[in-house]
Image: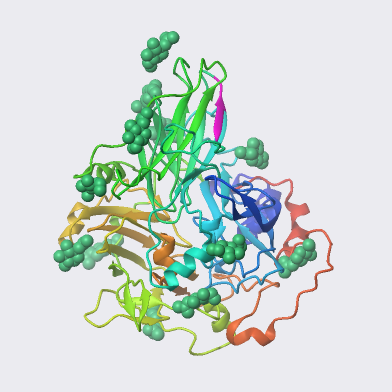
Amino acid sequence: MAALLRLPVFYVIHIALLSSLSLAADPYVFYDFKLTYITASPLGVAQQVIAVNGKFPGPLLNATTNYNVVVNVHNDLDEPLLLTWPGIEMRKDSWQDGVLGTNCPIPSKWNWTYEFQVKDQIGSYFYFPSLNLQRASGGFGPVIINNRDIIPIPFGQPDGDITLIIGDWYTRNHTALRAALDAGKDLGMPDGVLINGRGPFRYNTSLVPDGIAYETVNVEPGKTYRFRVHNVGTSTSLNFRIQNHNLLLVETEGHYTVQQNYTCLDIHIGQSYSFLVTMDQNASSDYYIAASARFVNESLWQRVTGVAILHYSNSKGPASGPLPDPPNDVYDKTLSMNQAKSIRLNVTASGARPNPQGSFHYGSINVTDTYLLKTVPPLRIGGKLRATLNGISFQNLTTPVRLADQHKVKGVYKLDFPSKPLDRPPKTDISLINGTYKGFIEVVFQNNDTIMQSFHVDGYSCFLVGMDYGDWTENSRGSYNRWDAISRATIQVYPGAWTAIFISLDNPGVWNIRAENLDRWYLGQETYMRIVNPEENGKTEMTPPDNVLYCGALEELQKPQKHSSASPLIPGKRRLFLTVLTALLASSLVFC
Ligand SMILES: *[C@@H]1O[C@H](CO)[C@@H](O)[C@H](O)[C@H]1NC(C)=O
Ligand SMILES: *[C@@H]1O[C@H](CO)[C@@H](O)[C@H](O)[C@H]1NC(C)=O
Ligand SMILES: *[C@@H]1O[C@H](CO)[C@@H](O)[C@H](O)[C@H]1NC(C)=O
Ligand SMILES: *[C@@H]1O[C@H](CO)[C@@H](O)[C@H](O)[C@H]1NC(C)=O
Ligand SMILES: *[C@@H]1O[C@H](CO)[C@@H](O)[C@H](O)[C@H]1NC(C)=O
Ligand SMILES: *[C@@H]1O[C@H](CO)[C@@H](O)[C@H](O)[C@H]1NC(C)=O
Ligand SMILES: *[C@@H]1O[C@H](CO)[C@@H](O)[C@H](O)[C@H]1NC(C)=O
Ligand SMILES: *[C@@H]1O[C@H](CO)[C@@H](O)[C@H](O)[C@H]1NC(C)=O
Ligand SMILES: *[C@@H]1O[C@H](CO)[C@@H](O)[C@H](O)[C@H]1NC(C)=O
Ligand SMILES: *[C@@H]1O[C@H](CO)[C@@H](O)[C@H](O)[C@H]1NC(C)=O
Ligand SMILES: *[C@@H]1O[C@H](CO)[C@@H](O)[C@H](O)[C@H]1NC(C)=O
Ligand SMILES: *[C@@H]1O[C@H](CO)[C@@H](O)[C@H](O)[C@H]1NC(C)=O
């Protein structure tokens, strides 16, 4: 308060305005994303892939902390579409999250404009189409949220920024993969791994056919680059490595890590990492960038390997010989888990805000509720192959949850999701977690399935406090990291093991918790947390946007869309009201 009093009066007025209307002061970025099918042959087989603005992968969405992001999404596919932005927390605004529990699908040939603020966030993420296994055909692209100029990054400014989107890939498209799952089949081994939409460099003539276009990353000797690597695949964990180069891990999903060198790192489905890589080799040849399958029989899955080329400007020739070795731990996967546990938060680094007192002391907060969520291999319910969480396979929601609440539509969902596995037959249902607003919860994922899994929590970044093989018990809490656990949105759970996270439920709305493995998710391995302020006063949660789409029980409220409009992007009403103030505030300081 003392500091505040020393400021000239007009600044104090600005502070008051900013604290209630912070949206207004922050800049806007506008994007137009058109999703279409294009023909591509990343693995030598022509297929329809989903492109964004003609690109596969899609273009970068580049913003800075607290920016308002407006993305007009045009659905030129032949099926409904939603884009989702995992890791972007959509504070108070689950209306923009882009999953079935929060949004009606954008019908084919319609467009819909997302508008959200990347409040208090930094880091590397990606967007993707959330419905119907579409991600297996593309539609994904990178998201970068830069630090504001006033907050330094905890390392020297890199000489360049390089995004690598990696993922397993099928030459069958998403409708064919869907048909396989609908018929009760497993998706089987993928046909390869793509890096930035391209197949492997021909590192082995018997494993890689001739004529495949591969990705080349051009670099200058002596320089240091920030590599942002995202696993957008269907279900395969990938070991990422660059021949002869250390990967200095610096950030994952919006938090700066303790900086450590790795020669390789397992990147699980849905996860994002930033590494600093220094071009400190002699360029006697190009170098391999490899992403190979993990947690499968790796000698049978050799074709599931992505290979790109790191090319120094003074390189003396092509890369040759075998790829750098993957971890040699076929019979002992503790190496991978130990590596995962070594990823910790840099508790003194600033992120979206300055951090003079060090990080949030999550380790000393009392847990208000515990949820033990167990997975088992897919099983049959009513004759259909389904995947479950605590014995419940989620059914398609037809009316978004908060929209149903607003319009007092009953019977859309239940709030009875069990907080631990129950001894009862599995079933399909629309059962949500009744989250307590301002609660501090512990969620334990127990993977009794046979595959490596990732789980994603929308709307939050979660403290990954522990993981181990075997069954979780209350005694497992003794091993939790209560000091510098990494905070992230996509969490790996090893087969036959558990992973525990803490979440501070301060973001009201409805938030998806899902298996990020596309097949399991499609088969129903998800739920939502409904978090509502019991004293809702119009401030804790946003009202629906003006352009909200209606469907399901509210379908009759939806007006048909006119396709003539060619007007430039104009902000919605929530913004129009606020932009009037922008001019007033333009000269003010940027507070956090
Ligand atoms: C997907 O593949 C199937 C054949 O498996 C084909 O009939 C269908 O047209 C393809 N869809 C698209 C969008 O390319
Ligand atoms: C993102 O935008 C900022 C300007 O806001 C620019 O300085 C930066 O180079 C852009 N980043 C990338 C990777 O294009
Ligand atoms: C659809 O796009 C047009 C501009 O092409 C825009 O004016 C309109 O607001 C968009 N519709 C929605 C629902 O976002
Ligand atoms: C943590 O962040 C601080 C502050 O930016 C930085 O100086 C330090 O090098 C980082 N520490 C590690 C171990 O990464
Ligand atoms: C290529 O891969 C095959 C199959 O794994 C292997 O037997 C062969 O040794 C490899 N060739 C080279 C030159 O590494
Ligand atoms: C990481 O490795 C590089 C060499 O590639 C080295 O210069 C640097 O000191 C290492 N950093 C840490 C934190 O170990
Ligand atoms: C470059 O380094 C490699 C090993 O990193 C070494 O085998 C090779 O002889 C070096 N070449 C030159 C020209 O120094
Ligand atoms: C992987 O498959 C190969 C070839 O079928 C087999 O010989 C090997 O035992 C398998 N490895 C494991 C760990 O199951
Ligand atoms: C946590 O709970 C313990 C015992 O139940 C209590 O003594 C302590 O004050 C609580 N801590 C906080 C921060 O509320
Ligand atoms: C969910 O919706 C999709 C697309 O409408 C449909 O193909 C699928 O069968 C539905 N799943 C269930 C379990 O109803
Ligand atoms: C949900 O939890 C709140 C407390 O957070 C409680 O008041 C309410 O009755 C619960 N609703 C249901 C349907 O269980
Ligand atoms: C699944 O759970 C059962 C009973 O706890 C255990 O015996 C089995 O080893 C577990 N399987 C996996 C893959 O975790």
Q: Residue furthest bottom?
A: 410
Q: Kindly identify the residue that appears in the image at 33 percent across and 59 percent down.
A: 502
> Where is 283 relative to 356, above or below?
above
Based on the displayed image, in which of its 4 quarters is residue 356 positioned?
A: top left
Q: Kindly identify the residue that appears in the image at 60 percent across and 44 percent down.
A: 6
The x and y percentages for residue 250 are 43, 37
Q: Is residue 507 visible?
A: no
Left or right: 422, with 580 as reference point: left
Left or right: 234, with 110 as reference point: left
Give the residues in magenta.
215-220
Queried whether the magenta region covers residue 3, the answer comes back as no
Q: Residue furthest left?
A: 475
Between 239 and 18, the residue placed more toward the observer is 239
The x and y percentages for residue 72 are 70, 60
Queried whether the magenta region covers residue 216, the answer comes back as yes
Q: Is residue 271 visible?
A: yes
The secondary structure that dominates the magenta segment is: strand
Based on the displayed image, in which of its 4 quarters is residue 291 positioned?
A: top left
Between 430 and 42, the residue placed more toward the observer is 42
The colouring scheme, among rainbow, by chain, secondary structure or one colour, is: rainbow
Q: Kindly identify the residue that appears in the image at 36 percent across and 42 percent down.
A: 302
The x and y percentages for residue 75 are 68, 64
Between 463 and 288, the residue placed more toward the observer is 288
Left or right: 131, with 114 as reference point: left
